[in-house]
Amino acid sequence: MRRFLSFCFAAAATSALASAAVIPIQPKAGDVSVTASYKGKGPVDETHDILVFLFDHPSPTGESRPLAVMSVTKNGQTVVFKGVTTDPVYVTLVYDEKADYDGTRAPSPGAPIGSYSKAGKPVPVKPGSKVVASFDDSVRWK
């Protein structure tokens, strides 16, 4: 009887460990703070804002869907994306040069765009990070 109970206990423990291994670990949520500045021609204001996007990939296309979008209406203003769980995220910025962009579709051809990058490459951002991103009108949406 003792061997039988030992076997049952070992089987139950193994089963519990196996089920624990398949439970996905939830990523820790964190805020992503982005301070955005546009250095090109034109004002940053209520009409010509900077849209700040979070994507789960570094090079968004017209078919890409953002994880989140917010806007700033003053150069150097900061937006905070709350409870971000995707790790990493990538920050893309679009200047609303023609005062006709709401962020629900791809930007108009020729819109100034930028990203949080170093040495010309998008930088992955972890939840809980604070980044400062600036761009100008030298790179435009095609």
Image (tube, rainbow, N blue to C red):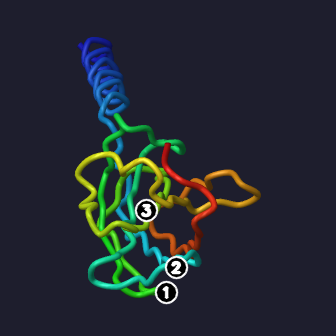
Residue most extreme to the right: 119
Earlier sequence position, callout 2 versus callout 1: 2
- Checking the image for residue 76, the label placed there is 1
Kind of element beneath mark 1? loop
Residue visible at 57% across and 75% down? 40
Of mark 2 and mark 3, the one earlier in the sequence is: 2
Q: Which mark is residue 94?
A: 3
Asked whether disc 2 touches disc 1, contact meaning CB atoms under 8 Å apart, the reply is yes
Kind of residue indicated by mark 1: Gly
Using residue 130 as the reference point, say whether residue 25 is left or right of it. left
Q: Position of residue 24 (x, y in %)?
A: 32, 37
Relative height, residue 60 to residue 20 (above, below)? below
Q: Secondary structure at mark 3?
A: strand
Residue 79 falls left or right of residue 104: right
User: Residue 14 sits in which quadrant?
Assistant: top left
Q: Residue at x 47, y 79 (%)?
A: 42
Q: Residue at x 51, y 58 (%)?
A: 113
CA gap, disc 2 to disc 3? 11 Å
Q: Secondary structure at mark 2?
A: strand
Q: Nearer the viewer, residue 3 or 68?
A: 68
Amino acid residing under circle 3:
Val
Q: Nearer the viewer, mark 1 or mark 3?
A: 3
Residue under the image location 30 percent in, 34 percent down: 23
On screen, 45 above or below 38?
A: below
x and y, in percent, of residue 51 in the image: 36, 66
The residue tagged 2 is 37
- The alpha-carbon separation of the residues under discs 1 and 3 comes to 14 Å
| Spot occupied by residue 131 in the image (x, y as percentages of width and height) | 55, 73
> Vertically, is 35 above or below 84?
below
Q: Residues within 10 Å of mark 3 (few under 14, many from 20)?
A: many
